[in-house]
Image: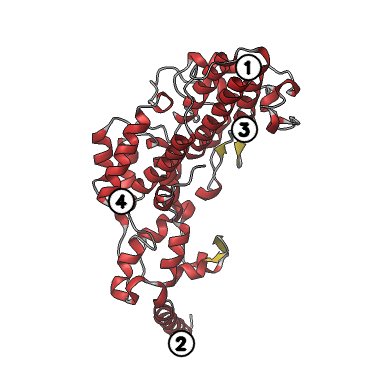
């Protein structure tokens, strides 16, 4: 190999790195290379303070006082009924058995968004699964069905495009069940079944499913209010979750994610776990934190000049994976294969992996500090926002 070419290449790399550090200095807090490591640890994100962790604990206690957010026991898995009919978002097998009408992606329910005002127009279909689910006390999405098969047969894939269970059909199911209650007058029965389904969704280790479950509590409340307006229920006959509390639950999921990715004091998780057993959002937030860090693990664990070593984040999550009772089967598999998200030398010239960012830019000290801020999202700002969903 031509040694002169190698010498020129190395010289160019040094010049690019130096120019990058100066050119992007304005984007780095304090504007000096001496603070670059600190910037990479929390790029553009102000971590939770001790006082904010106190606020999280108080909010967790409030959520625990609401029946919808009390942890379920884990003796009978509703996946026996649900997993075989759950489709996947992403590559993987299709459901093997016949799908109920509400779960069939080829069926379109016209007027579904107007289910409260014209419940009589909803098509007849078998909704008996909501009653059958009352016999189950948790939902492990990865224990069986297409998702379990996808995990078992998973081929090398980037975390961002790994398959996940789709819960879109459950939103349809909930609306149809509440509409049925408005029509036949057995609204209390419908509310009980919908609430139980929602709690099953909150018992999963899926960040997406948990968010959908929280959103379904809003749909449940709409059904209750419509039943009161129609004279089917007396006001106070049911205790819906307020919009303020569903907003708090949504923000808590983001906040717990921030704790797991390290945007909090080192003892934050211990303080939360000491305050109560199984804080709300534990498994979904840990799942999403693993996905977040797995995606950029190679960047954090392979620092460039002037950048600190941030293996502590990966080490912390690995310890949580070892200790947790959460299933996290997909997350464990992705974590065991960091090479699926790795950045090799030649990868720098091979494409754009993240949000239109050429991979070679993620090799430049200084500039990539800001890019990691984009790639590594955190729930801190979502918690600090008072907006309801």
Label 2 vs label 4: CA separation?
49 Å
Counting from the top left corner in percent of width and height, residue 372 is at 43, 62
Label 1 vs label 3: CA separation?
27 Å
Q: Which residue is denoted by mark 4 in the rendering?
A: 264
Q: Which residue is denoted by mark 2 in the rendering?
A: 4
Q: How is the image coloured?
A: secondary structure
In contact (CB < 8 Å): disc 2 and disc 4: no
Q: Residues within 10 Å of mark 4 (few under 14, many from 20)?
A: many
Q: Earlier in the sequence, mark 2 or mark 4?
A: 2
Mark in the foreground, 3 or 2: 3
Q: Earlier in the sequence, mark 1 or mark 3?
A: 3
In contact (CB < 8 Å): disc 1 and disc 3: no
Q: Residue at x 66, y 22 (%)?
A: 179
Q: Which residue is denoted by mark 3 in the rendering?
A: 87
Mark in the foreground, 1 or 4: 1
Q: Which residue is denoted by mark 1 in the rendering?
A: 181
Mark in the foreground, 2 or 1: 1
Quarter of the view holding residue 34:
bottom left
Mark in the foreground, 4 or 3: 4
For residue 365, say whether it is visible: no
């Amino acid at each position: 190999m031509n040694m002169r070419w190698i010498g020129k290449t190395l010289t160019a790399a040094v010049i690019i790195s130096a120019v990058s550090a100066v050119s992007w200095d304005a984007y780095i807090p304090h504007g000096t290379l001496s603070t670059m490591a600190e910037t990479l640890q929390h790029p553009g994100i102000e971590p939770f303070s001790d006082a904010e962790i106190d606020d999280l604990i108080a909010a967790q206690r409030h959520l625990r006082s609401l029946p919808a957010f009390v942890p379920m026991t884990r003796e009978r898995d509703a996946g026996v009924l649900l997993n075989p009919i759950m489709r996947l978002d992403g590559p993987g097998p299709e459901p093997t058995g016949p799908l109920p009408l509400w779960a069939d992606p080829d069926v379109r329910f016209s007027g579904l968004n107007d289910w409260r005002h014209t419940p009589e127009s909803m098509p007849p279909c078998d909704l008996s699964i909501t009653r059958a689910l009352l016999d189950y006390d948790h939902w492990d999405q990865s224990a069986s069905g297409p998702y379990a098969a996808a995990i078992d047969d998973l081929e090398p894939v980037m975390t961002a495009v790994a398959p996940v269970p789709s819960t879109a059909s459950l939103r349809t199911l909930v609306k149809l069940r509440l509409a049925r209650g408005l029509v036949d007058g057995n609204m209390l029965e419908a509310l009980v079944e919908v609430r139980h389904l929602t709690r099953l969704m909150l018992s999963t280790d899926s960040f997406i499913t948990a968010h959908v479950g929280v959103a379904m509590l809003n749909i449940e409340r709409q059904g209750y209010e419509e039943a009161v307006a129609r004279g089917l229920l007396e006001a106070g006959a049911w205790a819906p979750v307020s919009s303020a509390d569903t907003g708090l639950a949504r923000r808590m999921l983001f906040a717990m994610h921030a704790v797991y990715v390290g945007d909090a004091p080192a003892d934050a998780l211990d303080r939360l776990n000491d305050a109560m057993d199984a804080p709300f959002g534990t498994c979904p937030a840990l799942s999403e934190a693993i996905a977040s860090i797995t995606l950029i693990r190679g960047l954090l664990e392979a620092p460039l000049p002037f950048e600190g070593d941030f293996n502590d984040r990966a080490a912390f999550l690995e310890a949580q994976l070892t200790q947790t009772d959460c299933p996290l089967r997909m997350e464990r598999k992705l974590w065991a294969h960091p090479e699926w998200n790795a950045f090799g030398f030649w990868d720098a010239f091979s494409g754009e992996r993240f949000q239109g960012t050429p991979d070679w830019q993620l090799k430049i000290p200084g500039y990539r500090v800001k890019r990691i801020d984009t790639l590594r999202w955190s729930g801190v700002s979502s918690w600090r926002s008072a907006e309801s969903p």
